[in-house]
């Protein structure tokens, strides 16, 4: 089993503590089979709420799937204690936001979508419904009368 870290990078404007909200947050990934190299066309998601037993019954994972090309059973598990927020001081640099434990799979792409949350850097105003599908998000913080935003969202995967 190999651990992969999803590193998040964005430019933050007057916002901090950007994080996935809740155990039901969906991490949309493209996953490559480590055995044959097959990469399905469709985005697949994993979340912490789902737990599927592995063959042999010794443990479980967030997702277990059989490769359509080579029929190998692969799994990916979200390491919940590795989930970290992306803060104002992290702006414009890569920071590991979550780690995945993979057996036979390698994450190769990530598509941020809805389900992120953040807060005003100065006011603490909560922004509970941030959608990063367009790789940019803007809003207005009424408390400090300033625009807030997350721009130029990008990512990379690293082996941990």
Image (cartoon, rainbow, N blue to C red):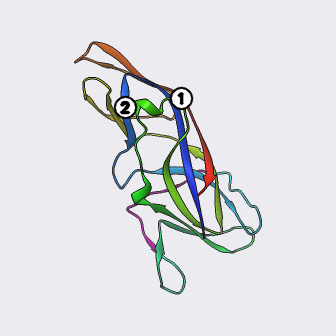
Specify the segment rendered in magenta. Answer: 43-52
Image position of 14 (left or right of 79): left
Q: Nearer the viewer, residue 129 or 145?
A: 145
- Estimate the spatial distance between the alpha carbons at disc 2 and disc 1, rounded to whole Å: 13 Å
**Quarter holding the C terminus?**
bottom right
Choose the circle earlier in sequence order: 2 or 1.
Answer: 2
For the point 58% across and 65% down, the residue is 102
Residue 115 appears anywhere in the view: no
How far across and down, in percent of the image, does residue 150 sit?
46, 27
Residue 16 is labelled as 2
**Label 2 secondary element:** strand
Q: Quadrant of residue 126?
A: top left
On screen, residue 44 above or below 75? above
Residue 16 appears anywhere in the view: yes
For the point 57% across and 51% down, the residue is 29
**Label 1 secondary element:** loop
Q: What's the magenta bit mostly, secondary-structure-wise?
A: loop
Residue 157 is labelled as none
Q: Nearer the viewer, residue 27 or 97?
A: 97
For the point 43% across and 34% down, the residue is 131
On screen, residue 58 above or below 34? below
Image position of 11 (left or right of 87): right
């Amino acid at each position: 089993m190999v651990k992969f870290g999803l590193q998040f990078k964005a430019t933050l404007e007057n916002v901090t503590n950007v994080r996935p909200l809740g155990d039901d947050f969906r991490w949309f990934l493209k996953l490559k089979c480590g055995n044959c190299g097959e990469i399905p066309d469709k985005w697949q998601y994993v979340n912490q709420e789902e737990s599927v037993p592995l063959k042999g019954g010794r443990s479980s994972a967030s997702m277990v799937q059989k490769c359509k090309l080579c029929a190998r059973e692969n799994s990916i598990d979200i390491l919940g204690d590795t989930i970290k927020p992306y803060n104002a001081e992290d702006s414009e640099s890569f920071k590991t936001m979550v780690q995945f434990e993979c057996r036979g799979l390698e994450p190769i792409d990530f598509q941020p979508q809805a389900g992120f949350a953040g807060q005003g850097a100065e006011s603490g105003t909560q922004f509970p419904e941030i959608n990063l599908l367009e790789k940019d998000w803007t809003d207005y913080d009424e408390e400090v009368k300033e625009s807030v935003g997350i721009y130029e969202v990008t990512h990379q995967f690293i082996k941990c």
